[in-house]
């Protein structure tokens, strides 16, 4: 029997949950969050589903499944080992108040043993150990035993390992159970609690049964949900007998494209290049261009880290290196993600331009290095070495190599200290960005999210139909809205946009939604990017009465019930975001202190 390919596994998962267990297949979302603009990237399949996990009805029902492309950067420095990836595909299935632990665990066991035919003696699981907040999950363990997992293969781990959420400071959360496959040599030993070495985690079932309160206590949820996630690349490595995620059928050709350019060894650097440029291709395909802020900054960092690794492998980087590897990525994933090859020209152009700009930055960095040498005593200090790394892209190894040629040392400990401080600040910023979010569906963020619909419509009225949303970010204090437009707005244009939005607010227009097909939404004039991101049914939010509609837009929510609840809209800044994209920052002043949600017609 031939090993299952990555494409086989992706389809087998969807078929299993649709055909055997009545799940609706929904489309994977963009890497740029639409319903939770307080995070930079979609990091899990559940992120686009937060409104539905909180109780809003999903157009496709209570049993859902999909494949979601995800980007996670918190472990970016671990990329290059056997299992970490920046961009990965997550297989997921959800129960929105439908089945719970018994159903989820039984289905997971069936897929692993019946469909993938993994022997039971190579499987182990972990469950929540329990603490003062919630009891030990004996229920999940008992279900696993009834399914076929013996007691010695069931471990119990603390909240750090077997608990999910909440996404913010409060909200849905609960214990989870994780599934592992024995990848060590010889006979499988114990379970991940007693023998952590040799067990590879492949799947996680989260049981959202609690809601964390503002006082830190945990209350039972009225709607209990199941949220699961299986890493496609990891299970592909298991099923294909690969020692690493880079040894799978879709990753190998990308790695070979890197190797064809390299004159030197270094597996870690080859993996970094393959991983980072693979992620860059998907990010660019979803509309992001390199910049110095937010998603654009992450994209720039990925591209430049790949080029730095290319330098270590003595790969020429004159503008053609990154695009050569990108072509291999497009060839491997164009079948599963049709929007990627459609963006090929844009992807290659963006990578070429960024590569050329980075080469120029490296040249400028050499000037700074010479200044550092001139002012150094016996060694280049760690802060200067970090400045060369962070600003000009010099890896510490490159600085040390060049310093050695001048008979100088480098304070590597000082570099690591500066680097760790930078990492801590970045992670704290990311956690703050996530925790303040629309995922909590606060009154402030709900009102600001609704205001983006009015702003989008007003911009199209003032500037033209070429205006489309390119991204957004919402905190409790302000909205930020990126849109396609190449010129700076005049004072008159900004004033007219403000006037139109505030007129719509003062008119106290009703806001309602209805569920329809993508084609019907398009025909009725709803705004939206009509591509592969949408499934069979969508929600169309309408601002205004039929016959006098101010805005008609595909969205997942949340929204207020009437525009009069928003207060006064004011633009505080308009600026460039990237080439061909402008950015508006705005606030709402006054308005209703609490929010009634828009309901279906």
Image (cartoon, grey):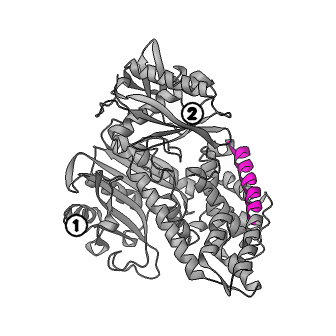
Tag on residue 405? none
Nearest to N terminus: mark 1 or mark 2: 1
For disc 1, the marked residue is 130
Q: Quadrant of the N terminus?
A: bottom right
Q: Residues within 10 Å of mark 1 (few under 14, many from 20)?
A: some
- Residue 250 in sight from this viewpoint: no
User: Magenta residues?
Assistant: 343-362
Secondary structure beneath disc 2?
Answer: loop
Dots 1 and 2: beta carbons under 8 Å?
no
What residue do we see at 58% from left, 56% from top? 298
Q: Position of residue 297 (x, y in %)?
A: 60, 54
Residue 328 lies in quadrant = bottom right
In this view, the residue in front, 430 or 185, is 430
Quarter of the view holding residue 487: top right
Report helix, strand or loop for mark 1.
loop
Residue that appears at 54% across and 73% down: 418
Q: Is residue 485 above or below residue 77?
A: above
Prevailing SS of the magenta stretch: helix
Q: Position of residue 521 (x, y in %)?
A: 50, 25
Which is nearer the eye, 70 or 123? 70
Q: Residue at x 66, y 59 (%)?
A: 303
Q: Quadrant of the image for the C terminus? A: top left
Is residue 356 on the magenta stretch? yes
Crowding around mark 2 (Cα neighbors within 10 Å: few <14, some 14 to 19, many 20+) is: few
Residue at the front extreme of this rendering: 375
- Residue 201 lies, in percent from the top left, at 42, 67
Q: Report how far apart the C-alphas of labels 1 and 2 lie in the structure.
A: 45 Å
| Residue wearing tag 2 | 529
Observer able to see residue 187: yes
Residue 533 at x, y percent in the picture: 53, 39
């Amino acid at each position: 029997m031939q090993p299952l390919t990555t494409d086989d596994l992706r389809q087998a998962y969807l078929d299993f949950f649709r055909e055997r267990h009545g799940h609706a297949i929904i489309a994977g979302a963009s890497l740029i969050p639409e319903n939770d603009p307080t995070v930079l990237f979609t990091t899990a399949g559940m992120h686009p589903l937060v409104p539905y996990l909180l109780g809003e009805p999903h157009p496709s029902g209570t049993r859902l499944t999909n494949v979601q492309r995800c980007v996670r950067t918190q472990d970016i420095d671990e990329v290059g080992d056997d299992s970490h990836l920046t961009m990965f595909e997550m297989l997921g299935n959800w129960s929105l108040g439908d089945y719970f632990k018994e159903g989820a665990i039984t289905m997971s066991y069936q897929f692993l043993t019946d469909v993938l035919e993994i022997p039971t003696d190579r499987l182990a699981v972990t469950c929540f150990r329990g603490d003062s907040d919630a009891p030990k999950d004996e229920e999940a363990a008992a279900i696993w035993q009834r399914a076929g997992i013996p007691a010695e293969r069931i471990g119990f781990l603390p909240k750090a390992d077997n608990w999910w959420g909440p996404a913010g400071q409060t909200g849905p959360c609960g214990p989870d159970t994780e599934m592992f496959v024995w990848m060590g040599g010889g006979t499988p030993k114990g379970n991940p609690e007693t023998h952590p070495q040799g067990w590879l985690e492949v799947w996680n079932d989260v049981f959202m049964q609690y809601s964390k309160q503002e006082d830190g206590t945990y209350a039972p949820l009225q709607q209990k949900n199941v949220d699961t996630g299986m890493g496609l690349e990891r299970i592909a490595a298991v099923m294909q007998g690969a020692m690493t995620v880079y040894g799978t059928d879709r990753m190998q050709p990308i790695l070979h494209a890197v190797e064809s350019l390299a004159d030197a060894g270094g597996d870690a650097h080859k993996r970094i290049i393959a991983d980072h440029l693979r992620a860059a291709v998907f990010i660019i395909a979803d509309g992001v261009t390199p910049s110095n802020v937010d998603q654009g900054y992450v994209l720039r960092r990925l591209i430049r880290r790949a080029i730095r690794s290319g330098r270590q492998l003595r790969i020429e980087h004159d503008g053609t290196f990154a695009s050569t590897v990108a072509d291999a990525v497009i060839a491997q994933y164009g079948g599963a993600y049709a929007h990627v090859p459609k963006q090929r020209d844009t992807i290659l152009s963006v990578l070429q331009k960024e590569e050329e700009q980075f080469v120029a930055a490296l040249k400028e960095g050499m000037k700074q290095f010479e200044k550092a040498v001139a002012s150094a005593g016996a060694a280049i200090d760690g802060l200067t070495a970090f400045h060369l790394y962070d600003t000009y892209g010099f890896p510490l190894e490159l600085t040390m190599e060049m310093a050695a040629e001048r008979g100088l040392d480098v304070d590597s400990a000082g570099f690591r200290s500066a680097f760790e401080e930078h990492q801590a600040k970045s992670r704290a910023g990311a956690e703050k960005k996530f925790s303040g979010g629309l995922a909590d569906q606060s009154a402030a963020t709900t009102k600001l999210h609704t205001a983006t619909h009015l702003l989008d419509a007003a911009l199209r009225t003032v500037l033209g139909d070429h205006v489309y949303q390119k991204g957004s970010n919402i905190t409790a204090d302000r909205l930020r809205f990126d849109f396609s437009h190449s010129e700076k707005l005049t004072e008159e244009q900004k004033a007219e946009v403000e006037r139109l939005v505030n007129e719509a607010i003062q008119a106290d227009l009703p806001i309602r939604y209805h569920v329809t097909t993508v084609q019907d939404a398009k025909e009725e004039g709803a705004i939206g990017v009509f591509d592969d991101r949408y499934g069979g049914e969508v929600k169309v939010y309408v601002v205004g009465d039929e016959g006098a509609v101010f805005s008609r837009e595909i969205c997942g929510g949340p929204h207020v019930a009437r525009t009069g609840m928003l207060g006064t809209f004011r633009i505080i800044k308009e600026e460039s975001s990237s080439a061909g994209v402008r950015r508006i920052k705005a606030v709402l002043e006054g308005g209703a202190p609490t929010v009634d949600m828009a309901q279906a017609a």
